[in-house]
């Protein structure tokens, strides 16, 4: 392990089929007015909405309804939520949904009482809240992003031409999250599988960085192996509770800051994915899947030692009689095979990337000077072309 770090994660998790039983009790820790934020209505169809309302009513809360948080939530929607918070003097934002709803809730929390331009302050300049913030709690219904136990808030601003992530500090992490794997059983297969790849991508973004022998890499390898095992089961039988529960727990640990301890991160696949999302509004996990293989094949030589380790420790590739390059290449072939097996989108062309909008996508890619290689804009275009 190299470097100094602080690890602080204050989110309280309630996990399992009975997790909802704790919601009413937890709500007693907050003031009388709760803003219930949710997406396009899936929670009304699968009964989660009724269960949440019952928990809120059981402890006499005043409920402010805040529906319609869209996948890839927009800054305009954040500003709408801010008005509701101020008008109703909201004491707690309860986000019920996937990463989009939880990210949105954190954005509203930090922006509602912000006296500056919140987009510029947080998402462009990566500043910290200096105003009052509103506590956020979560009920997770879709697995993938890790938003349930981190400070991430990824917001799309089409007027500004960017989809940007802000990672807030622990004061904006959800105070508590209800994690019931059963709640994820109604997620459509496409979204479910996109979430699976999102988890793998979070693991790889943090694995493919750094050079030291690091405990964190061993933890990461264990999570990858568990994820590969359980997603193979869940892709065939989405109702397999054990597999879905393992995947939910893996997703939470994949992006709650544990795996960056003692190392950096790469995150270039996410930057390219966000740019595709901005231009096409495609599902986050699928944008990552569509560019990952061209990206990793491109940077493999720059971080060869770690790609060899990935092949051996995650996929069980035998190194005898092979060059490092052959071993690393075989590891990426195994990744490709697993992606096809679970059924992710393999080409960005299927998501709407075309020769016509390629420049627009490339212009929206943030190039990060970390990871094994800092891309040039031409390399970004090459990777995008290969991904199509
Ligand atoms: O809106 P509803 O009707 O709820 O439908 C949603 C949505 O259409 C549906 N869904 C969710 N739970 C369901 C369900 N449908 C049936 N049954 C259920 N139980 O699934 C669709 C996708 O939901 P969404 O919240 O958009 O998905 P996800 O959790 O993948 O979140 C994606 C957003 O998170 C950001 C992404 O960029 C994207 O904007 N990310 C957040 C991160 C973080 N906070 O750290 C990191 C990630 O890398 C990612 O960037
Ligand atoms: Zn992601």
Image (cartoon, grey):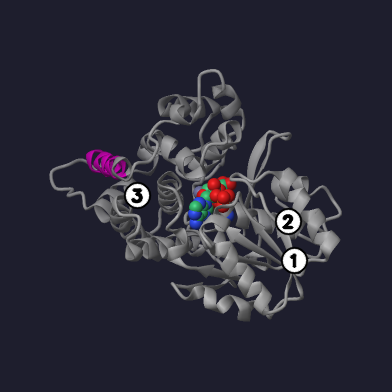
Q: Are marks 3 and 2 in contact (CB under 8 Å)?
A: no
On screen, 337 above or below 102?
above
Q: Which residue is mark 1?
A: 134
Magenta segment: 325-338
Whether 81 is drawn above or below 334: the answer is below
Question: Quarter holding the C terminus?
Answer: top left
In space, the residues marked 3 and 2 are separated at their CA atoms by 39 Å
Can see residue 219?
A: no
Identify the residue at image location x=67%, y=58%.
Answer: 37
Residue at image mark 3? 306
Mark 1 burial class by Cα count in 10 Å: few <14, some 14-19, many 20+: many
Q: Main secondary structure of the magenta part?
A: helix
The 10 Å Cα crowd at callout 3, few under 14, some 14 to 19, many 20 or more, is: many
- Circle 2 sits on which residue? 108
Question: In the image, is residue 59 part of the stretch drawn in magenta?
Answer: no
Question: Could you tell me how many numbered marks the image carries?
Answer: 3
Q: Position of residue 175 (x, y in %)?
A: 63, 71
Query: Where does the image place residue 108, in percent across and percent down from the top left?
Result: 73, 56
């Amino acid at each position: 392990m190299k470097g100094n770090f602080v690890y602080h994660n204050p989110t309280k998790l309630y996990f399992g089929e009975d997790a909802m039983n704790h919601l009413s009790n937890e709500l007693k820790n907050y003031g009388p007015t709760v803003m219930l934020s949710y997406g396009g209505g899936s929670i009304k169809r699968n009964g989660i909405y009724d269960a949440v309302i019952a928990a809120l009513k059981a402890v006499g809360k005043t409920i402010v309804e805040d529906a319609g948080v869209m996948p890839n939530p927009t800054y305009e929607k954040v500003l709408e939520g801010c008005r509701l918070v101020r008008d109703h003097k909201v004491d707690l934002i309860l986000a019920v949904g996937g990463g989009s709803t939880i990210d949105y809730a954190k954005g509203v929390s930090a922006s509602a009482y912000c006296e500056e331009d919140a987009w510029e302050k947080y998402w462009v300049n990566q500043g910290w809240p200096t105003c009052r913030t509103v506590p956020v709690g979560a009920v997770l219904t879709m697995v993938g992003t890790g938003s349930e136990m981190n400070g991430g808030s990824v917001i799309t601003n089409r007027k500004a031409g960017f989809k940007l992530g802000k990672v807030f500090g622990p004061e904006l992490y959800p105070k508590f999250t209800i994690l019931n794997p059963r709640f994820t059983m109604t997620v459509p297969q496409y979204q479910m599988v996109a979430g699976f790849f999102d988890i793998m991508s979070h693991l790889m973004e943090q694995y493919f960085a750094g050079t030291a022998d690091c405990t964190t890499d061993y933890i990461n390898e264990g999570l990858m192996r568990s994820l590969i095992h359980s997603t193979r089961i869940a892709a065939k039988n989405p109702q397999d509770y054990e597999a879905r529960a393992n995947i939910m727990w893996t997703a939470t640990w994949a992006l709650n800051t544990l795996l960056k301890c003692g190392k950096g991160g790469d995150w270039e696949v996410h930057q390219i994915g966000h740019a595709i999302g901005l231009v096409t509004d495609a599902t986050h996990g699928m944008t990552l899947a569509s560019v990952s293989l061209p990206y990793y094949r491109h940077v493999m030589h720059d971080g060869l030692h770690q790609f060899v380790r990935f092949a051996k420790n995650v996929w069980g590739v035998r190194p005898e009689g092979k060059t490092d390059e052959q071993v690393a290449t075989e590891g990426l072939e195994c990744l490709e095979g697993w992606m096809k097996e679970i059924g992710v989108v393999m080409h960005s062309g299927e998501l709407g990337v075309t020769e016509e909008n390629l420049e627009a996508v490339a212009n929206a890619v943030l190039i990060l000077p970390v990871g094994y290689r800092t891309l040039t804009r031409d390399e970004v275009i090459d990777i995008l072309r290969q991904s199509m």
